[in-house]
Image (cartoon, rainbow, N blue to C red):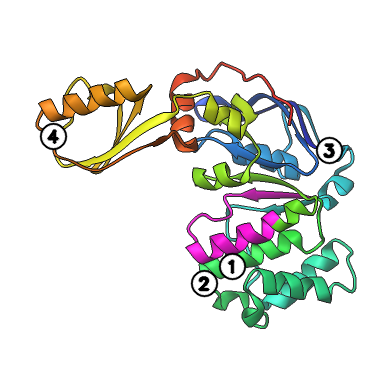
Amino acid sequence: MTAISFQHVSKSFSSRRGEVQALDDVHFDIAAGEFFGLLGPNGAGKTTLINVLAGLSRASGGRVSVLGHDVVDDYAAARRCLGIVPQELVFDPFFSVRETLRIQSGYFGVRDNAAWIDELLNSLGLADKADANMRQLSGGMKRRVLVAQSLVHRPPVIVLDEPTAGVDVGLRQTLWQFVAKLNQQGHTVLLTTHYLEEAEALCSRIAMLKKGRVVALDRTSALLAGRPSTMLRFKLDGALPPALAPNARVTGRIVQLKTRDAADVEQVLAQLRSAGCAVEDLEIGRADLEDVFLDIMSDAPASSAATARAP
């Protein structure tokens, strides 16, 4: 069964610079029960696509449905199936945490929801803040309330748009434990994140957007297998030898180099020794999703389209 279906979705905006194509023929399905990742750089169109899914924006072309309900023609049923955690911290400053969740329950027509609200408060570490006014909460606690609001009506499809942006490690662990549990119970999860280690650990399948188009769509394991599998990582105080610099990714003192095999690793190390480079904390490991993401974003032209792979 298909939980979310994006059928040739396009979205354009008018600006002072002319027409902006935010989404360009986005086409893929997410199966019921999947934990699906939607990745891309800033401005790729991820939030625009979620806004179309949520009914906050109307597509210029194409069709979007949630569990068979068209988000335009059958919007009420589609929205009841969705629980969306937005990027922005949006809250009502006049209510406590528990009152906020009760009001959200009423918005969806859910009665006698106290037990589930208590479970949400306990699972998201909000029990001791239940009677606190929303204005008194830290940014991380407000983020937890947004997650609870999105789940209060027990939606079968959960959409998390950068849910852990700017929050502490404790919240990230608490949130992922709870969301993973919901996914195991059959809930479909759509996640956007810039923390690619989260996507690699959680998502069974991933789509990558670039300038409004899908440039990669496959199982996470296949994306990782399809790129050079060996990465050489080390710390370096000085400059890299010129021959190695074009293929290196440097973050501060940390250098990462793609290598094909053991012979290639030895050749790189020989070049470093010959140049007198003092290498520290040398590691040889497999490429991770961040490596794959950077490769795809640099390789794929904005006009290319990915071939969909089944869940």
Asked if the residues shown at circle 2 and circle 1 are in contact, with their CB atoms under 8 angstroms apart, the answer is yes
Q: Nearer the viewer, residue 306 or 96?
A: 306
**Quadrant in the picture for residue 295:** top left
**Quadrant in the picture for residue 93:** bottom right
Q: Residue furthest front?
A: 262
Residue at 70 percent across and 24 percent down: it is 309
Asked if the residues shown at circle 1 and circle 4 are in contact, with their CB atoms under 8 angstroms apart, the answer is no
Q: Is residue 188 above or below residue 20?
A: below
Q: Which of the two marks, 3 or 2, is nearer to us in this view?
A: 2
Measured in 3D between alpha carbons, the distance from the residue under mark 1 to the one under mark 4, in whole angstroms, is 48 Å
* Amino acid marked by disc 3: Val
Measured in 3D between alpha carbons, the distance from the residue under mark 3 to the one under mark 1, in whole angstroms, is 30 Å
- Confirm whether the magenta stretch covers residue 181: no
Q: Residue under circle 3?
A: 72
Q: Nearer the viewer, residue 74 or 199?
A: 199
Residue at 57 percent across and 50 percent down: it is 162
**Picture disc at residue 142:** 1
